[in-house]
Amino acid sequence: MPHYSFVIPADEGWHLKITGGQLEVALITNKIDPFIFQIKLMRNLIFDENMKHSPANIVAKDFRELEKRTMIEQGANKGLYQLKDLTMGKEKIGGKMFYTMNYIITSKSGSQNASLYLFFPKAKDNDYFIVAHYAETIPANAFLVKSYKPDFLSTLASLSIK
């Protein structure tokens, strides 16, 4: 990618798809029937001038709160799914600080265990940040034996800004 790079997980069925443009989206998927594991990385541009000059933790809090509100208003409140166990925090991976949000979405068709990790190139004065999302989609009546979240975390550990 023009602004960042990463190493995809070791070959256990992961497939990489890159879409160009300003967002520099990388979609890494692994389908192990009936489960789908997905890692998505993208560059999120900051347009608001005040937010560009704000500390990373403030921008991260604002972004995560917007994501939470969107999931509640557009999904949970409309009865499409239930949002459970939502937690926000921060985590150091590969010497880099990530602002996190973990949650579970459940519906009649199954559930999704998901994690959102935000990485900022600098402590403040950022024009963009990296959004990394991990999801394990589990059909109803299925039991997940193995999580591939360690693969996601190894991808985050390899993340570097150019």
Image (spheres, rainbow, N blue to C red):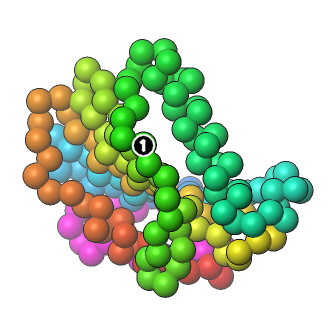
Asked if the magenta segment contains residue 121, the reply would be no
Return the x and y of residue 136 as percentages of the image width and height: 29, 47
Q: In the orientation shown, which residue stands out farthest toward the top?
A: 78
In the image, the segment drawn in magenta is 3-16
Return the x and y of residue 53 as percentages of the image width and height: 84, 65
The residue located at (71%, 58%) in the rendering is 58
The residue located at (60%, 74%) in the rendering is 4
Residue 71, compared with residue 76, is above or below; it is below
Return the x and y of residue 123 as percentages of the image width and height: 71, 75
The residue located at (38%, 24%) in the rendering is 81
Which image quadrant is residue 17 in?
Answer: bottom left
Callout 1 crowding tier (Cα within 10 Å): few <14, some 14–19, many ≥20: few
The residue located at (56%, 24%) in the rendering is 73
Return the x and y of residue 101 as percentages of the image width and height: 47, 52
Q: Is residue 12 visible from the viewing direction of this image?
A: yes
Q: Is residue 132 visible from the viewing direction of this image?
A: no
Q: Which type of secondary structure does the marked residue at label 1 adopt?
A: strand
Residue to which mark 1 is pinned: 86
Of helix, strand and loop, which mostly describes the magenta segment? loop
State left or right for residue 16 relative to residue 36: right
